[in-house]
Image (tube, rainbow, N blue to C red):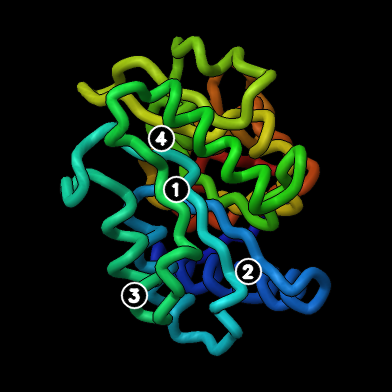
Amino acid sequence: MEIRQCETSNDVAVAGAKFIYARAGEAIAERNQFTLALSGGSTPWHMLGKLAEYELPWERMKIVQVDERAAPDGDPERNLAHIRNEFADRISLPVENLYAMPVTDEDLERGARQYERGLSDLAGAPPVLDVVHLGLGGDGHTASLVPGDPVLDVCDRDVAATGLYNERRRMTLTYSIINRARYILWLVTGEGKAEMLNRMIQADRDIPAGRVSQRQATVVADAAALSGHHQT
């Protein structure tokens, strides 16, 4: 695991955009396609705004969702609207290059299976994504892999539906596909994340984030979030 410390949350957003830009250039040169999985949160939206300022053949980029709330289209809690507003629309990404999780399907499990099939069509069988971006919750969750949810133990599917979390069910990528990614990018900001970030770096499997592969992971965090981490 590589750890990159930045002074401010703005610096984290800039560094995250630079990381994705570099990986995108490599992937497009090697495979003529770049697959990026995006999570929610506030820092990522700032990062995507920075990323949109770069010049790349973005029509060769395919964006998938790490997770999404089961909510109607247009709901302000949906990650999809932010991905569109902060990035996809600003770079004129072809509509078909943004793969939205089908969370309006009344049968979320069926929707998860549908999304999984789409990922296989996009990135091979089993699908290997170029970059999976992750955030970290104050309870140690990442994606919608939350403490106590049965989805934490799913190892034979790449996409699954969760139980209720903050009054919403979710659809999420599972550890299987996250840990298969070529690169994993963590963006973490704020002192409130310091304890969980330290536990995640220590691969503490008692928190969901601690079960994510570290082999291909890069953590970009501000000084406040890394205040609890002491390198040995």
Q: Which mark is residue 137?
A: 4
Measured as percent of width and height from the top left, residue 82 is found at 29, 59
User: Which one is nearer the viewer's eye here, 112 or 128?
Assistant: 112
Q: CA distance from mark 2 to mark 3?
A: 21 Å
Residue under the image location 33 percent in, 53 percent down = 80
Measured as percent of width and height from the top left, residue 164 is found at 30, 17
Q: Amino acid at mark 2?
A: Phe
- The residue to which callout 3 is attached is 89
Q: Earlier in the sequence, mark 2 or mark 4?
A: 2
Q: Earlier in the sequence, mark 1 or mark 2?
A: 2
Measured as percent of width and height from the top left, residue 95 is found at 41, 68
User: Which one is nearer the viewer's eye here, 101 or 146?
Assistant: 101
Q: Earlier in the sequence, mark 1 or mark 4?
A: 1
From the viewer's perspective, is 123 left or right of 63? right
- The residue to which callout 2 is attached is 19
Q: CA distance from mark 1 to mark 2?
A: 16 Å
Using a 10 Å C-alpha cutoff, classify the residue at mark 2 as few (fewer than 14 neighbours), some (14 to 19) or many (20 or more).
some
Residue under the image location 66 percent in, 66 percent down = 34
